[in-house]
Amino acid sequence: MKALVYRAVNAVSLQDRPIPTLSSPTDAIIKVTKTTICGTDLHIRKGDVATCQPGR
């Protein structure tokens, strides 16, 4: 499946990823048909929003 992957500021790429599988009775796989972004998403992409360090 295709996935838009955010790796770092201005480092976004469209990648092929494995199709997810169900591993628990409470899991669900959904199909996203429409989506949108908000202003905060744009600030995150530009690097205006601080990120958490691993382990925090």
Image (cartoon, rainbow, N blue to C red):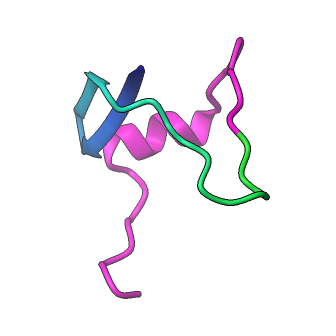
Which quadrant: the N terminus? top left
- Residue at 71% x, 52% y: name it: 27
Above or below: residue 13 compared with residue 49? above
For the magenta stretch, what is the residue range? 29-56
Toward the viewer: 56 or 26?
A: 26
Toward the viewer: 37 or 4?
A: 4
Residue 38 coordinates in the image, percent (x, y): 65, 32
Residue 44 coordinates in the image, percent (x, y): 43, 46
Above or below: residue 44 compared with residue 32? below
Q: Is residue 23 left or right of residue 14?
A: right
Toward the viewer: 13 or 20?
A: 20
- For this orientation, the residue located farthest to the bottom is 56
The part of the image, by quadrant, that contains residue 52 is: bottom left
Q: Is residue 49 left or right of residue 30?
A: left
Which quadrant: the C terminus? bottom left
| Residue 49 falls within the magenta-colored stretch | yes
Q: Is residue 30 left or right of residue 2?
A: right
- Residue at 71% x, 12% y: name it: 33
- Residue at 40% x, 26% y: name it: 3
Total numbered labels: 0
| Residue 51 falls within the magenta-colored stretch | yes
The part of the image, by quadrant, that contains residue 26 is: bottom right
Residue 45 coordinates in the image, percent (x, y): 37, 38
- Residue at 33% x, 30% y: name it: 17
- For this orientation, the residue located farthest to the top is 33
Q: Main secondary structure of the magenta part?
A: loop
Toward the viewer: 49 or 56?
A: 56
